[in-house]
Amino acid sequence: MTSNSDIAMTIIGVGPGDPQMLTLRAQQAIRSADLVVGFRTVLNVVEQWAGDAELCPMSYRDQEQVLDYAQEQVRSGKTCVVCAWGDLNVSARELIERVQRRAGRVELIPGVSSIQFAAARTGIYMEESIFVTLHKRADTSGDLDELRHHLNEGLRNIILLPRPFDLMPPLIAGNLVEAGVPGDRPVIVYQRLTFDDEQAWRGTLEQCAAISEEFSDLSIMVFPRPSQEPD
């Protein structure tokens, strides 16, 4: 019987959403796979390269079972590619760890990051910026403290990835204002970067905290440093 150490699986970063942002290496991996696994919204992006491969959608509730099925298919000699949104090293840690528990060899094929697009849309540079992610199940109080520190310091641009769906831009903005960050601090919220319905909201922390409409789970916040605030 094949042991886990003999099982090889590939994980690709699909990018922010535009199929044209999928790298050539990722396209090649999908074309050569027998099984393509991912959340339905991700599979909708990559299915044009899947050919005759079995598309295996998963959700947060059944991802363990779906990955168990993928493992068994690989044991039987099939090749499997697992697809994830965006940058694998930003928001896919839990998925990567789930795959690593089932395969001894896991190849990561990174994609274009929404961080790059957010920086490009804002006109800021990574060497003048820091990145903070709340997109994790672990306690985020330390990350929020770090965010507040850098906002008050005002030396760098800050790119922040919210956590769907319980720690989204209005709640984050409200928490920052309550913690003493000035309510007039400018913030930009990008939604669904690279999609046809991409949106950008610009305002202050106080205005953001007052928003009652739901933001997309594909949201990213940018806090330009004071000298870099857009006109």
Image (tube, rainbow, N blue to C red):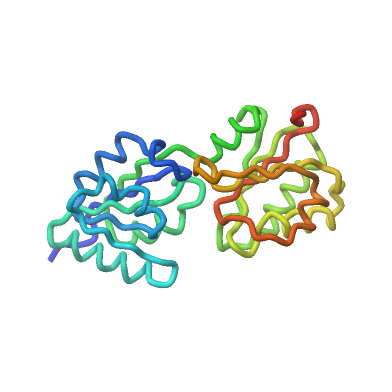
Q: Quadrant of residue 25?
A: top left
Residue 226 falls in image quadrant: top right
Residue 46: x percent and y percent?
33, 48
**Percent of width and height locating residue 19:** 39, 41
The C terminus lies in which quarter of the figure? top right
The quarter holding residue 67 reads: bottom left
- State the residue in front, 169 or 101: 169
Tell which of 161 and 142 is nearer to you. 161
Q: Pinpoint residue 154: horizontal percent, then vertical percent.
A: 79, 36
Q: Vertically, is 2 above or below 21? A: below
Position of residue 184 measured from the top left corner of the image (x, y, whole percent) = 86, 44
Q: Is residue 207 left or right of residue 30?
A: right
The residue at 23%/52% (across/down) is 8
Which residue is outermost to the front? 196
User: The N terminus is located in which quarter?
Assistant: bottom left
Q: Nearer the viewer, residue 97 or 26?
A: 26
Q: Is residue 107 left or right of residue 21?
A: left
Residue 69 vs 149, above or below: the answer is below
Q: Is residue 198 left or right of residue 7?
A: right
**What residue lies at 17% left-to-right and 52% top-to-bottom?**
52
Of residues 101 and 15, the one drawn nearer to the viewer in this rendering: 15
Identify the residue shown where x is 73% and y is 60%.
171
Q: How many marks?
A: 0
Q: Residue at x 26, y 44 (%)?
A: 49
